[in-house]
Amino acid sequence: MKLYLKLAWRNLWRNKRRTVITMASVFFAVIMATLMMSMKEGSYTNMTNSMVASYTGFIQIHAKGYWDSKSMDDSFVFNDSLKAVLDGNKKITGYVERIESFALSATRETTKGAMVVGTDPEAEKRMTHLDEHIDSGEYFLADDKAVLIGAGLAEYHKVKVGDTIVLLGQGYHGTNAAGKYPIKGIVKFGSPDLSKQLIMLPIKEAQRLYGTEGTISNLVLLIDDASEATAIANQLRGEISPNLEVMAWPDLVPDLVDMIEADRVEGYIFMFILYMVISFGIFGTVLMMLAERKHEFGVLVAIGMKRAKLAFVVYLEVITISLLGAFVGIFGAYPVIGYFFLNPIRFGGEEAGKMMEEYGMEPILQPSLDVSIFIKQAAIVAIVASIIAIYPFISVLRLSAIKAMRS
């Protein structure tokens, strides 16, 4: 094998110009594909962290049936055994107890359905940094009997900090849920939909409002790496009560997952076109090489070299030149991507920047340094080269020494 590699390497550099041109085409294709996919993956990470971590959380635990019913009747007790399981998992860095339900929000002149969330103010601050999204007013405290209201809902009701809002709904097992609360702060939530319908109050007051003292509707878990959410959720399912269900963020926000996957397919189509162009370039180089060396191959076969060994050397030449271009492209792409990772592209006052801010996303374009992105490019080039190399391999196997030497 070592001898074959040595022969292939020496044959490559017998025609330096052809080798360099082929490597250059692969080099630029790999840089473009790597940069594009890195930018896309980085934007997905920014999108996920902004839109999921800002409210939904990466993992939630509910009573079985709650996610479908959204009924306060499907609440559960956050007992010591569940707490011990969560505290014992090193990948879970925190959790937030919540009560989520719906109610009719009303002022003197307007009414609108709202999503009411009772939460632990301190835990919510640690997980979603809700206090940093206060547009006006102040953040609430655990013992407050006041609410935070989304900026969109506040605009609909034409209310401001200090005004009063009434909540009417159905509590635990059909009890009436009614309360009158002053507005302590107006929050600009990451999602415009949340901003138009969300009202938050301390969990103690929410339990009193809905008659669910001692129970919660869901438990939001905090983790450091969003990519591990599904694995952690699967692990927890085997450790907690079968009466509870664990959902990772892809199940909690399937629309976001579908949007990311659709955009990722667009990137794959672009890569396919790019590598198809490069494939024809490599194939053209192979045809040129076969034409130039046809007499040489005929002589080698005539003096006794086996066609299979000669074909294998040619096969290695095609693979080697392609992988060389790929690896040089990867090493060339890394510093470029590293620079933009440290100095992300920031959107200014343009429409795109404003739109990203409205969705709670930081208006930046920062690439991902995920190693798998780079490995995929080398793998794609290796597959393409392996397919193209089949043609010269078969051609050499079918070579007629007499016809080749007369060419």
Image: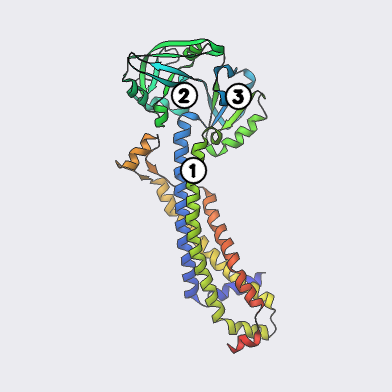
Q: CA distance from mark 3 to mark 1?
A: 27 Å
Question: For the residues carrying marks 3 and 2, which lies nearer the camera in this image?
Answer: 3
Looking at the image, is mark 3 or mark 2 earlier in the sequence? 3
Question: As shown in the figure, which amino acid type bears the numbered disc 2?
Answer: Glu
Looking at the image, which residue is at 47% across and 63% down? 27
Classify 10 Å Cα crowding around label 2: few (below 14), some (14-19), many (20 and above): many
Q: Quadrant of the C terminus?
A: bottom right
Looking at the image, is mark 2 or mark 1 earlier in the sequence? 2
Q: Position of residue 233 (x, y in %)?
A: 60, 32
Question: Residue 124 shows which numbered tag?
Answer: 2
The residue at which mark 3 appears reads as 65
From the viewer's side, name the closer residue of 309 and 172. Answer: 172
| Local SS, label 2 | helix
From the viewer's side, name the closer residue of 359 and 21. Answer: 359
Q: Is residue 76 above or below residue 21?
A: above
Q: Position of residue 191 (x, y in %)?
A: 41, 32
294 left or right of 268 in image? right
Q: Position of residue 280 (x, y in %)?
A: 51, 68
Q: Is residue 55 above or below residue 336?
A: above
Question: As shown in the figure, which amino acid type bears the numbered disc 1?
Answer: Ile
Q: CA distance from mark 2 to mark 1?
A: 27 Å
| Local SS, label 1 | helix
Question: As shown in the figure, which amino acid type bears the numbered disc 3?
Answer: Gly
The residue at which mark 1 appears reads as 260
Q: Quadrant of the N terminus?
A: bottom right
